[in-house]
Amino acid sequence: STLRDPNRFADTLARLEALLGSENVGSPEPLNRHSPDSFSMRPFSEKPTPVPTNIVSSKNSDLTANASPHLLRQPSQDSQSLPLRRYRPPIPLHLGTSHDTKTGNLCPDEILTGQLRGRPHHRAGPWKFSGNWWDHQRWTRSEWDIQLEDKSLYRITHRDGAWYLEGIYG
């Protein structure tokens, strides 16, 4: 579809660029990386550029991310996923944890502070992600899906020695 008044739109873009900086106004373009939320801004054009098919999309960074299969799997053949509404930026949490003796991984046992409180009724994870191990921009993170007593589902992550509430399913 075309713009009703391209001149007005150009004026609005110019005002936003003056306010926010030209590097912060445009269309997001995914980068060819596995890191969650990796994108660059390209100048806005009326015709969107198609997303390259060679980009490997990390399921955890999509709005329609799949949660743990055994938490969310529907009994029917038509498996559906719940949308993950992400918090940007993620919300810091303080958790009580334990070590899994089989794997040595940290396991979330109780949410002590933050927007959520309580013990996870079910938990699935960790799913470990890492990248750029070869340079100074290396990153690593572990993700968990947890379900609280009220049946609400959340995605939490552990990275840089801290826990975060990444989002809520549904």
Image (spheres, rainbow, N blue to C red):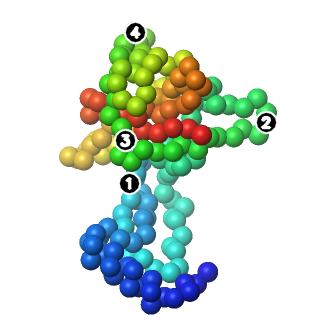
**Residues marked 2 and 1 touching at CB (< 8 Å):** no
Q: Position of residue 30 (x, y in %)?
A: 43, 60
Is residue 58 in sight in this rendering? no
Report how far apart the C-alphas of labels 2 and 4 lie in the structure: 35 Å
Q: Nearer the viewer, residue 142 or 134?
A: 142
Q: Position of residue 34 (x, y in %)?
A: 42, 48
> Relative to 31, does residue 25 appear above or below in the rendering?
below
Residue 53 visible in the snapshot: yes
Labels 2 and 1: the sequence-earlier one: 1
Look at 35% across and 46% down and name the residue there: 89
Q: Is residue 26 left or right of residue 76?
A: left
Q: Work out how far the residue at label 3 is from the one at label 2, CA to CA, in angstroms.
A: 34 Å
Residue of label 4: 101
Please state the horizontal and vertical placement of residue 72, each as a whole percent of the image: 64, 31
Work out whether mark 3 precedes mark 4 in sequence or the reverse, and give the earlier one. Answer: 3
Say which residue appears at 58% left-offset and 23% top-offset: 150
> For the residues carrying marks 3 and 2, which lies nearer the camera in this image?
3
Q: Which residue is mark 3?
A: 90
Residue type, label 2:
Gln
